[in-house]
Image: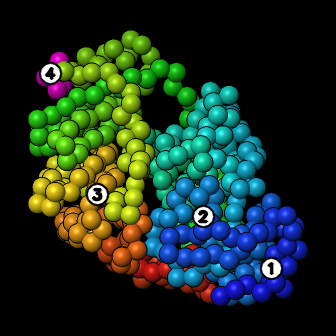
Amino acid sequence: MTIPQTIDEQFRTIVGAEHVRAATADDSPVGTNCKIAVSPGTEKEVAAVLARANELGLAVIPCGGGTKLGWGNPPERADVLVSLSRLDRIIEHAWADLTVVVEAGCTMEHLQNTLANQGQRLALDCLWPEKATVGGVLSTNDSGVLRLRYGALRDLVIGVTVALPDGTLASSGGKVVKNVAGYDLPKFVTGAFGTLGVITRAIFRTHPVCRESQTLSFTAADVETMQVKVLAIQNSQLAHTALQVRASSDGSLEADVLFEGRGAGLQAQEKQLQALLRMAGVTREAGGWRAREQLWNGVGGESVIAKVVVLPSKLATTLQKLQEQGSTGGFAWKAVMQATGIGCIRVDGPAGPVLARVAEIRNYVEANGGSLAILHFSANAERIDCWGTAGDSLALMQAVKCQFDPKRTLNPGRFVGGI
């Protein structure tokens, strides 16, 4: 549909003429075409824009830095892109209380730099922090290896303000770490891909910056041996902050362990790790922590990148399944798996066959209690479901969607089960 000029003028009245423009191809998720881009400057303006779009039956695509705009299924409709880029303030850093209040359009890099001035950080390692925004990271539930020590993103966010499609600004949580009163809106909207409301601000718990750290890496002859070593570390008394495994179709197999603390403590941790693994081949290397981001280098239409969640005890068999699929069809693959069982894989090959290989991996993962969600596949040869089997919770999620967004204004069809 083409948005009439009279409707375009209504958005200009809300946010100002200079903050409304024609949308471009970069403003739209894959397979869609937004007509107009609107950049509200306040939470009230966000709510007013949503209310007007909801009233007019227009589909809204919320956007932060645009780094994950292609994740999830292509929306069924895409009329108005609502950019949160102007809501970029850090409202309050209560450093003594270890909390920070920040608007959704603030980049993660700016937030971390500001917190670092007081010796603190948000214990989160997201993709592309220089562009990724707070709202986008929350909406896509993007967290990395630090969750092993500090918990998932849902454990770090303690309050949010969300603009709902009817124009309501809803807030939940507070500026204290142990606040448990009221409806747990932060956990609802984290990972909901903007299908329930548009996050306008968030409150996080922070942690002190660790002044010294050390990464130790080691290899293994095969995935079974690597599995044993990873589980041994997890079951040990080692105080590691992060643990990941990197593997690929070229035969490389390496693990990275991150320790944080003081010099003497780090030395003691290294000795304990070597004793635990009964080997002297532990090396010091810090470059491996960018491996998840490097999976996206040079992606094309014949590349599939997926998020995989498996039981930690299924790490070896999952990597074996990747090896099996790669060897039978000559496909190249890479995997970066956390000790928690969460990871990302990349498979390269001809568009149709590579999807078939990923589908077989998904079937295996789901049969063993896990999940596989496709994050990137730009080839338009066929429409695919990015999410896989929805599970028993689909009916509940549909009911929540109906309660928050009965007219399906926000990202319609983008989430699990076509929500």
Q: Earlier in the sequence, mark 2 or mark 3?
A: 2
State which quadrant residue 251 falls in.
top left
Q: What residue lies at 40% left-to-right and 55% top-to-bottom?
A: 299
Q: Residues within 10 Å of mark 2 (few under 14, many from 20)?
A: few
User: Is residue 277 shown left or right of residue 200?
Assistant: left
User: Identity of the amino acid at label 3?
Assistant: Asp
Residue at which label 2 appears = 26
Query: Of all residues shown, which one is farthest toward the top?
Result: 264
**Any magenta on residue 295?**
no
Q: Position of residue 89 (x, y in %)?
A: 75, 47
Q: Residues within 10 Å of mark 1 (few under 14, many from 20)?
A: some
In this rendering, is residue 240 above or below 34? above
Residue 348 circle label = 3
Task: Tell me the mark number nearer the camera, choosing from 2 and 4.
Answer: 2
Callout 2: SS: helix
Task: Write the start and end of the magenta stretch as one range.
Answer: 276-280
Q: Earlier in the sequence, mark 1 or mark 2?
A: 1
User: Identity of the amino acid at label 2?
Assistant: Asp
Residue 410 visible in rendering: no
User: Is residue 361 shown left or right of residue 189?
Assistant: left
Residue at which label 4 appears = 279
Task: Tell me the mark number nearer the camera, choosing from 1 and 2.
Answer: 2
Residue 8 circle label = 1
Callout 1: SS: helix
Mark 2 and mark 4: Cα distance apart in space: 50 Å
Q: Earlier in the sequence, mark 3 or mark 1?
A: 1
